[in-house]
């Protein structure tokens, strides 16, 4: 979607760089899964600069001159762009490129001939690809950059491929509106309920839903999430940005999966649980924060003992 020479990019902002004059073919964050090669990222700390250096798909980093000089020999095929405000500069470049139409090329032309049932008020943008036997309920919107597999049903008043919530502030502390340029990939035999949102990925790549997954009503799937095969996501669940659940996962009502959390295959998440971090396969978690069931029960027992003790005073 993008192919711009780095020297042309930095010239617009009066910046200097160190390294090769490479082509930039995508933007992304250093600690995210990246699908495109030759990607530009940014780093304001040693931690995120290390992420960028370790990711072979990244070939340029917006950072401070001090950090670049300290890490240049760690990987000499990366080009460093110098600025005092790496995050602000990175997003300014990205927003300007989006505004200029650099990310607007469609991968495919919409063909709705395989949609066997389309409700009243359905909106389908150009740049959507459908498999066979797709059903769409009333007033649902399918946005550009969405790929839908075979035998998929989508309920009423849902939005597939809308922009997610990426909160970034400029150097003056003002909120910036960050456009999303990725897509949504929905596998085969997927069922999506009413009033559900699945956001497109922030940069390149897709927010993904695996085959045979069932998503209930009033569910929110944020940008860059990855849902495995044969999962069950019940009503009012939320997956925060860049969270990932494996295959055969059960999310009970009102469950929340925190940013960047990774949930292993076969895991059961109890009602109103709040999940963060890396969860081993076949876990059974409950609570806020979510804990293994034996720890959760032990905490409840201890809590009841404290209440009983206090009442006895």
Image: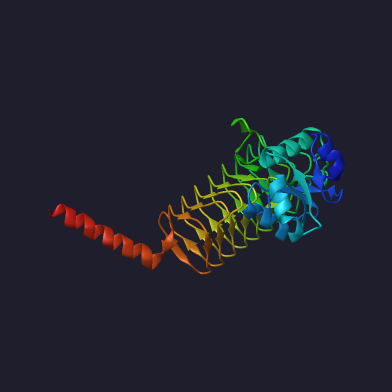
Residue at 78%, 39% (x, y): give it: 126
Residue toward you, 219 or 123? 219
**What x and y, as percent, mark residue 99?**
77, 33
User: Going by the picture, which residue comes out furthest to the left?
Assistant: 313
Q: Measured from the top left, where is residue 279 in percent x and y?
A: 52, 64
When the figure is inspected, residue 8 is found, relative to residue 187, above or below; the finding is above
Q: Residue at x 60, y 47 (%)?
A: 222
Residue 27: x percent and y percent? Answer: 75, 46
Left or right: where 131 falls relative to 48: right
Q: Residue at x 22, y 57 (%)?
A: 306
Q: Decide which of 49, 143 is in the foreground and name it.
A: 49
| Whether residue 96 is situated above or below residue 135 in the rendered picture | above
Left or right: 171, with 37 as reference point: left
The answer to whether 36 is drawn above or below residue 292 in the figure is: above
Point out the residue furthest to the bottom here: 282
Counting from the top left corner in percent of width and height, residue 49 is at 68, 53
Report the coloring of the rendering: rainbow
What is the number of callouts on the image? 0
Residue 302 in view? yes
Foreground residue, 177 or 89?
89
Tell me if residue 148 can be seen: no
Q: Quadrant of residue 160?
A: top right
Location of residue 262 by image quarter: bottom right
For residue 12, what is the image quadrant? top right
Q: Quick one: 235 or 9, which is closer to the camera?
A: 9
């Amino acid at each position: 979607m993008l192919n711009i020479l780095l020297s042309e990019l930095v010239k617009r902002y009066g910046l200097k760089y160190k390294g090769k004059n490479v082509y930039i073919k995508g933007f992304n964050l250093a600690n995210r899964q990246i699908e495109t090669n030759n990607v530009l990222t940014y780093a304001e700390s040693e931690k995120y600069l290390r992420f960028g250096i370790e990711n072979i798909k990244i070939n340029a980093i917006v950072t401070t001159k001090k950090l670049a000089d300290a890490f240049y020999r760690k990987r000499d095929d990366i080009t460093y762009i110098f600025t005092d405000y790496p995050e602000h500069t990175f997003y300014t470049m990205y927003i300007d490129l989006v505004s200029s139409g650099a990310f607007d090329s469609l991968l495919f032309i919409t063909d709705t001939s395989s949609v066997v049932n389309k409700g009243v008020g359905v909106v389908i943008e150009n740049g959507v690809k459908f498999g066979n036997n797709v059903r769409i309920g009333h007033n649902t919107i399918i946005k550009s950059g969405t790929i839908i597999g075979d035998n998929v049903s989508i309920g009423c008043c849902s939005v597939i491929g809308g922009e997610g919530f990426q909160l970034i502030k400029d150097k003056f502390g003002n909120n910036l509106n960050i456009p999303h340029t990725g897509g949504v990939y929905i596998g085969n035999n997927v069922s999506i309920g009413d009033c559900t949102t699945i956001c497109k990925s922030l940069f390149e790549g897709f927010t993904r839903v695996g085959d045979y997954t069932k998503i209930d009503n009033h569910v929110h799937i944020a940008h860059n999430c990855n849902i495995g095969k044969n999962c069950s996501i019940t009503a009012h669940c939320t997956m925060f940005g860049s969270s990932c659940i494996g295959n055969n996962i059960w999310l009970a009502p009102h469950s929340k999966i925190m940013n960047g959390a990774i949930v292993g295959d076969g895991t059961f998440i109890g009602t109103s649980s709040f999940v963060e971090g890396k969860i081993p396969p076949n876990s059974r978690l409950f609570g806020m924060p979510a804990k293994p069931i034996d720890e959760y029960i032990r905490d409840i027992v201890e809590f009841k003992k404290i209440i009983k003790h206090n009442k006895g005073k």
